[in-house]
Amino acid sequence: MIVFANPRATRPKNRRFPLSVMSLGAVLPEWEKWTILDGNRPGVDLASDLRAFVRSRDGTPDAVTLVAMTVMPGPQLVDAVSASRAFKAEFPHVPLVWGGYFPSLYPNPVVRAPYVDWAVRGQGEETFLQLLSALREGRDPKGVAGLAFADDGTEWIAPERPWKSPDAFPSPPYDHIDVDEYVHPTALGARSAVYQTSIGCPYSCNFCGVIAAYGSRQRVEDPARTEMNLRFLVQQHRVDSIHFYDNNFILKEEITDELCDRITPLGLSWWCEARIDAMLRMPDRTWERLKRAGLRMVFLGAESGSDAVLKKMSKHLTTDKTVAVAEKCRSYGIIPEFSFVLGDPDDPEADVAQTLAFIRRLKAVNPVMELITYFYTPTPQRRGTYGNVDPLEGTPDTLEEWTTPEWIGWMTHEDPELSWLSRPLKARVEDFALVLKSRFPSVHDSKTKRWGKTLARVLARRRWERGAYENPWMLRAIRRAARAGDDERQEYGHLRPSRSHA
């Protein structure tokens, strides 16, 4: 039996389908037994539960022959290291494979770890199958594209594998999970699920981890298959809303039109990510289709209020286009969720001032716009650098160093230690975000009690009108007092709060 392990990346109540390991299980032959152990489920402790599961099947016909673990940077890496180290100490003979974003971006520290036997880089379905075959047949694994491992002390990192469309592989195997356990209420609906129709991104923004992992290419599944899988979730599990995890969901007019026409009868409300310029290329008839099909909110990477900084990012975008898409979204009743990367290393003071002023302009254009702020923490790229900062310089050589608080803060963008970004400048961003979100409460904020939102909105009004953001201590106190639960720092993507400490 093969065990696919999904280390903890979020709190149990925020868990979503473990799509990465589901996709690997889907390609296994029918006779291969496999299961998923999800560290995000309630009561699961991956370090102990994984060992207990393997121990319980030791010596039986269903003995565990391999463990495959998906690993993203950030909190999931911490759980993965702890679970892997404990597992290999007890079961050194059982192969342990890592895959996912972290080993794709940083293969060297992974293969140096004595408790990781193999690392799969990039799209893992075919690499994983070929590794299994090589292990069982005793063949040299160096011929497996996308594989990395330590070979007698030498780090072997094979060439990457060409990317394929999701259509090249089976649909998600929902029969291997308890679907209803992963369906939760969100701002979109009472029973929200997640889905991904494509991999990669065709653009080349030089600060983005997606480009570092995938390169500038995107592969999209046939809209007919998307409709089939979503229809299953709607009819069999009463799903009423979807968060699409594609890096660029709206890319080509003809695909967007067909998909909208296919899913409109399903009656879904949905959220997605898209490029600002791609959205602006869509004709009015496509915008009408998007609205009719259920698009309620779109995540858009505005990134900066400076055209010069956008050019440096290779964003191929202008601030005028961001304003234009804000206006377009308002006219169709679609909420734009703009993300900004603050703290340009070459002139962080000017970048922060210009971007905060631009955000105020956007809020005037579209009052319901949502704001997500990040501090600039570069993701290592294959080529080049950003500004005067080499993103590869000083990155850790070991997984143990990667899991220190300093590097976890870097990977999650939460208060990272940055030589070019001072504490007062960070505080300016955080205070601004707190005033904005107090004056205009987020539709995602289900954790602040109604009285807290009302009081904060009143008290933030004059501050917002005067542009006075410094030390909003009363707003911070109200926010703390009115919290209905703990501040959820470990949440997937769009479900996270702002990367400020608002």
Image (spheres, grey):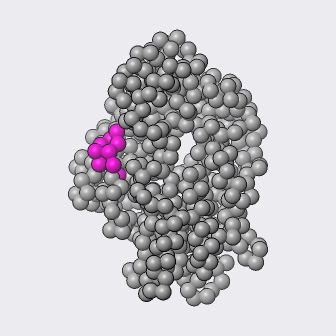
Q: Is residue 321 left or right of residue 392?
A: left
Spot occupied by residue 454 in the image (x, y as percentages of width and height) = 37, 21
Q: Is residue 129 visible?
A: no
Q: Which residues are magenta?
A: 184-193
Q: How many marks?
A: 0
Q: Nearer the viewer, residue 42 or 443?
A: 42
Spot occupied by residue 277 in the image (x, y as percentages of width and height) = 50, 38
Q: Looking at the image, which residue is at 59% across and 56% down?
A: 77
| Residue 195, quarter of the rendered image | bottom left
Q: Looking at the image, which residue is at 52% across and 80% down?
A: 65
Q: Is residue 266 above or below residue 323?
A: below
Spot occupied by residue 493 in the image (x, y as percentages of width and height) = 48, 46
Q: Is residue 286 left or right of residue 73?
A: left
Q: Is residue 409 visible?
A: yes
Q: Nearer the viewer, residue 381 or 462?
A: 462
Q: Is residue 65 left or right of residue 418?
A: left
Residue 418 highlighted magenta (yes or no): no
